[in-house]
């Protein structure tokens, strides 16, 4: 059975087509005055030269709705208001409960999707920007994967370039074992800073570092071996962080800048052959169409600098070519902070001009804003340094375990620890994913860990509470979901909300605006609360109890699935 929304839409599309002559989006939405309304008549008035109310009347006459609606009315300037038949709602609920995917259809045409996310830099601490990229990218991987697409997770780590000269020399100064140890315990920033200080203060060191870069780029075996130590230790550290964040990234997903090394020259040659490469101040650049600076001069992407070296833009050109041409990706998603917006716009435009990016593929920069402290400034530690990601997570888990201990002192130690983990990490992820992606948001432990409001703990608690209804009542989910009878207003409100899940997931898979899913789940938990206040579940006659237990179960599974798509666990008790 199609989802409620699809069923209703299909029938309205057919009726509007009969009236308008071609396919029209019926502009379906939830209504204040009925269950749903369709507003398309208004926009059609001009085209058809008729009054919107008359169009609506014709559509209603043509539409086959009587088996699913009890009431269809035209209101206001020409809205079509529809009240759904309870029997139809019952069938929809039974179908959703009976479906392991809760009525969410997998994508008709599965695509190969590359998701570029996390992408910290080797021998440098991950910062909160990488935190956002990791959470958003992980949610993208989960949602698109659940929709049935084939996903390539690509962790485009910064593992190449000039800083590696000084990093390798610093490693040698420390001694390989000592240096590796410093990195493996996660003291990445100290390592990087110490190298930088020497590079700036000690001319002999700086000279050695510069020579080392030449050796590295020339493929010198011993230099590559040392470079590999830095890579391995940093990757091990990143994997440790990912484990603590409970995200899907694995060690197979590191496809860093160095991976594209041997493709850079070919990219350069290809751009030259296409006539796109221009000499500018001794460098070789492309000027993608449509980008100028304040003085109106065209903006370049530097493909090869005047010393013959390649940089960030060169690598991203090779990367996009590889993804579109060699991996044949239908969709490429770059989850990177908004400060790099212009960079990606220029890369995408250059890819169009080079013929790599055509209408067959969709390439998007999924940008995001910054994280602010409660003082309204960029999140920093007390000493003014950028904050360590893992420290935030540890602190969130610590606070969560206090909150859980207070809320439910009866939990045994092992369960309490597992719940605290889910709540702490969930709170940080949810605070991020529930705010509009392109906006900045304030990192506030107290708010994100509150059990009230639009927070992970609130949703997790709603989930746990439903589990406890089954536990306390010592009842299972009725085997036959068709026992559902939607009667009370609060039941109807809950059901309409639950049946919207497929629409919400499809919308989020398209736009990757995860706050819409978060907002939806918050709505589900809120209408469930109202339902639970007005509709006793256990203390009622058997038939009503079974019907309501089915609603409880559909709510529970919707919350659990929705949270899982955001990378957040749903505890059974807390
Ligand atoms: N390593 C970069 C940074 O820390 C992010 C890389 C994003 N991905 C890309 N294809 N450029 O800013």
Image: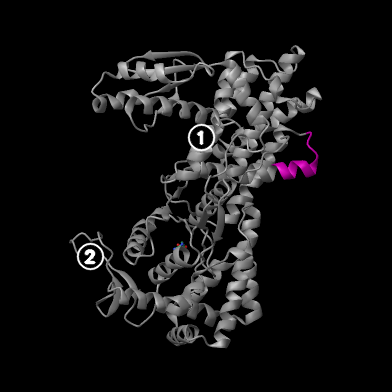
Q: In the image, is residue 554 part of the stretch drawn in magenta?
A: no
Question: In the image, is residue 27 above or below residue 386?
Answer: above
Position of 535 compared to 268: left or right?
A: right
Q: Is mark 2 within 8 Å of ligand 1?
A: no
Pair 2/1: label in front: 1
Which residue is at a point 23% across and 61% down the rendered structure image?
293
Position of 223 compared to 42: left or right?
A: right
The quadrant where residue 524 appears: top right
Q: Provide the secondary structure element on which disc 1 rests.
A: helix
Give residue 447's mark: none
Could one spot residue 70 in this view of the protein?
yes
Q: Position of residue 167 (x, y in %)?
A: 52, 77
Q: Provide the secondary structure element on which disc 2 rests.
A: loop
Q: Position of residue 378 (x, y in %)?
A: 43, 51
Residue located beneath label 1 in the image: 503
N-term-proximal mark, 2 vs 1: 2
Other residues around mark 2 within 10 Å, as few (<14) / some (14–19) / many (≥20): some
The quadrant where residue 33 appears: top left
Residue located beneath label 2 in the image: 298
Q: Position of residue 104 (x, y in %)?
A: 58, 37
Q: Position of residue 245 (x, y in %)?
A: 62, 52
- Circle 2/circle 1 CB separation < 8 Å: no
Q: Main secondary structure of the magenta part?
A: helix
Residues at marks 2 and 1, CA–CA distance in whole angstroms? 43 Å
Q: According to the image, what is the colour scheme of the structure?
A: one colour
Could one spot residue 454 in this view of the protein?
no
Other residues around mark 1 within 10 Å, as few (<14) / some (14–19) / many (≥20): some
**The magenta stretch spans which residues?**
410-419
Q: In the image, is residue 418 part of the stretch drawn in magenta?
A: yes
For the N terminus, which image quadrant?
Answer: top right
Question: In the image, is residue 219 above or below residue 545?
Answer: below
- Residue 406 vs residue 563, the one in the foreground: 563
């Amino acid at each position: 059975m199609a989802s409620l929304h699809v069923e209703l839409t299909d029938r309205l599309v057919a009726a509007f087509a009969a009236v308008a002559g071609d396919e029209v989006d019926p502009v379906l939405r939830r209504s204040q005055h009925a269950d749903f309304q369709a507003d398309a008549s208004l926009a059609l008035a001009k085209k058809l030269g008729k009054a919107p109310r008359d169009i609506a009347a014709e559509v209603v006459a043509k539409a086959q709705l009587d088996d699913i609606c009890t009431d269809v009315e035209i209101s206001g300037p020409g809205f079509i208001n529809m009240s759904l038949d309870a029997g139809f709602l019952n069938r929809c609920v039974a179908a959703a409960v009976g479906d392991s995917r809760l009525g969410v259809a997998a994508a008709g045409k599965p695509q190969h999707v590359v998701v570029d996310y996390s992408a910290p830099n080797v021998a440098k601490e991950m910062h909160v920007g990488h935190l956002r990229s990791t959470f958003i990218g992980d949610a993208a991987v989960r949602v698109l994967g659940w929709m049935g697409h084939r996903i390539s997770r690509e962790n485009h780590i910064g593992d190449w370039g000039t800083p590696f000269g000084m990093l390798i020399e610093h490693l040698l100064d420390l001694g390989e074992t000592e240096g590796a140890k410093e990195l493996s315990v996660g003291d990445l920033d100290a390592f990087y800073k110490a190298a930088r200080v020497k590079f700036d203060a000690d001319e002999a060191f700086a000279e050695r570092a510069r020579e080392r870069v030449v050796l590295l780029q020339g493929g010198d075996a011993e230099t590559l071996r040392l470079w590999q130590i830095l890579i391995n230790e940093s990757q091990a550290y990143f994997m440790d962080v990912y484990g603590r964040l409970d995200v899907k990234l694995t060690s197979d997903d590191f496809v860093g800048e160095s991976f594209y090394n041997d493709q850079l020259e070919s990219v350069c040659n290809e751009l030259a052959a296409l006539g796109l490469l221009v000499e500018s101040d001794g460098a070789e650049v492309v000027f993608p169409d449509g980008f100028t600076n304040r003085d109106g001069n065209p903006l370049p992407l530097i493909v090869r600098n005047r010393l013959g070296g390649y940089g960030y833009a060169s690598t991203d050109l090779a990367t996009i070519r590889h993804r579109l041409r060699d991996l044949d990706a239908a969709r490429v998603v770059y989850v990177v902070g908004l400060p790099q917006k212009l960079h990606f716009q220029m890369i995408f435009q250059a890819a169009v001009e080079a013929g790599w990016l055509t209408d067959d593929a969709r390439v998007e920069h999924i940008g995001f804003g910054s994280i602010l402290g409660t003082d309204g400034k960029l999140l920093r530690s007390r000493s003014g340094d950028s904050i360590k990601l893992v420290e935030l997570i540890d602190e969130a888990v610590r606070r969560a375990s206090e909150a859980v201990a207070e809320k439910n002192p009866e939990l045994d130690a092992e369960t309490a620890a597992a719940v605290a983990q889910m709540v702490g990490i969930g709170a940080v992820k949810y605070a991020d994913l529930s705010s509009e992606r392109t906006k900045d948001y304030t990192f506030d432990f107290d708010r994100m860990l509150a059990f009230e409001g639009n927070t992970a703990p609130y949703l997790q608690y709603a989930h746990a509470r439903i589990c406890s209804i089954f536990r306390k009542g010592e009842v299972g989910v009725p085997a036959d979901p068709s026992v559902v009878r939607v009667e009370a207003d609060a039941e109807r409100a809950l059901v309409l909300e639950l049946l919207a899940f497929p629409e919400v997931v499809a919308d989020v898979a398209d736009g990757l605006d995860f706050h819409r899913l978060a907002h939806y789940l918050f709505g589900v938990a809120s209408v469930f609360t109202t339902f639970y206040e007005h509709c006793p579940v256990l203390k009622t006659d058997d038939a009503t109890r079974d019907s309501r237990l089915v609603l409880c179960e559909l709510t529970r599974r919707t919350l659990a699935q929705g949270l899982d798509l955001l990378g957040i666990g749903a505890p059974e008790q807390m």
